[in-house]
Amino acid sequence: MTAEPSAPIHWRSLLVPVYGPTTLISIGTGAIVPLIALSALDLGATVPQAAVVAALLGFGQLAGDLPAGALAQRFGEKRILFAACLVDAAALFVGAVTGSLAVFSAAVFVWGLATAVFGLARHAYLAEAVATHYRARALSTLGGTFRIGLFIGPFAGAFLVDQFALGAAYAFAGSMSLAGGLLGLTLPRLPADGRAAPAAPRRGTWSVLVAHRRALATVGVGILLISVARATRQSIVPLWAESQGHDATTTSLIFGAAAAVDMLLFYPGGAIMDRFGRLWVALPAMVVLGTGFLILPLTASVATIGLVACLMGLGNGISAGIVLTLGADVAPSEDRRQFLGGWRLCADLGNVAGPGIISLVTLAFPLSAAAVALGAVSWLGAGWLAKWVPRYSPKPPRERAPVG
């Protein structure tokens, strides 16, 4: 597990250098994620091609997870965070001005790569910088700022597209990435940065992952299942509302209400994890998400669908930061960055696989069957986490944790 930093940085001192860039970049991300498929259509793509282009963002993140860990190990979090923001901004500015579908598709993929590097740098930095008794609050706040940005972003994107054009939203997102990169330059030095470099070369990424394969095959699988539940929640609620005859405006309101519940609970979730242990959040979150999936087929009206969406938002919101926190708990101190690359790969595989489950099930069965299947997967994930999380995650101190 990650060792306690020799002189940990108080996490509230990181509000600007860590949470500021995350908020800015997530606002930009929220502004353009809903527009990727529309931009592809404008450039001549068919509907299936546009769906593939939109999926390239997720595939770029998958492709970037392991290299991100190796880059952080070699160059350090601060430098690769700034470099990722520059690459991110360049890809978005290209997306704003290109008239080629192929170039636009490449820009989306590169954007995904940069997102993976940026995410790894933030995660690894906080895992090292923050004391264990603040860890869950620090990482849950990171997850919360990302949610806040994604909530604000679509409104900014809609305004820019209405006033200007699609390209304006991409230029705005690129500007947010540049601003985030500049803020990231104010990161304090990590305690480990002042220590002498080891004489022997560090192990390669695959050697690290093989050495810690048991953790990845146990808690890592639990993280994959959490990501499946979270990703499919965002897809199945709008699909179910549409299947019940509700229009896009109504569906957006339902999703907005659930997002508001989601945003309110990240800090309480982190405080619970720091005070009582990680399982006190991981287990209820998966049970609540699973229950939401199982009862969704019983709903039809706006009110009932909205209540279930808010219930699922409750489960998702209180578990903000659980993936990041467990990764920091499990990561070995010597090979932390490379291990976290593999850890984040598990999470991103779940993000990609989740919507795929809906597609596969609905090829032969109605959407309600997909909801029931996802409920079963979520409850299976709860049982899996209950078995493995206590074996890897540190127990909270017996004395009251300091309030941070």
Image (tube, rainbow, N blue to C red):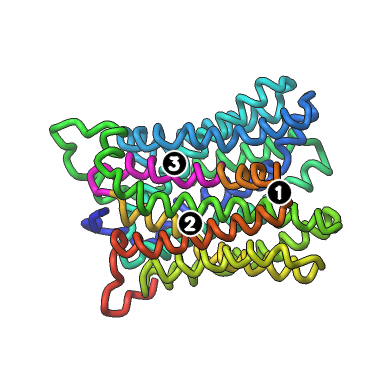
Give the vertical position of 193 relative to 49 (above or below). below
Give the amino acid type for the residue marked by disc 1 in the picture.
Phe
**Residue topped by disc 2:** 142
The span picked out in magenta is: 332-352
Main secondary structure type of the part rendered in magenta: helix
Give the amino acid type for the residue marked by disc 2 in the picture.
Leu
Specify the quadrant that holds the N terminus: bottom left
Q: Which residue lies most toward the front here?
A: 364
* SS for dot 2: helix
Give the number of the disc on residue 345.
3
Give the vertical position of 252 relative to 95 (above or below). below
* SS for dot 3: helix
Whole-percent x and y of residue 315?
56, 66
Q: Nearer the viewer, residue 217 or 323?
A: 217
Whole-percent x and y of residue 302?
81, 67
**Residue topped by disc 1:** 365
Specify the quadrant that holds the C terminus: bottom left
Give the vertical position of 245 relative to 63 (above or below). below
Whole-percent x and y of residue 20?
52, 52
Q: Is residue 348 magenta?
A: yes
Residue drawn at (72%, 59%) of the image: 255
Give the amino acid type for the residue marked by disc 3 in the picture.
Leu
Q: Examine the rendering and report whether any part of residue 85 can be seen.
A: no
Tell me the mark number nearer the camera, choosing from 3 and 2: 3
Do residues under tags 3 and 2 come within 8 Å of each other at their CB atoms?
no
Which callout, 2 or 1, points at the residue further toward the start of the chain? 2
Which callout, 3 or 2, points at the residue further toward the start of the chain? 2
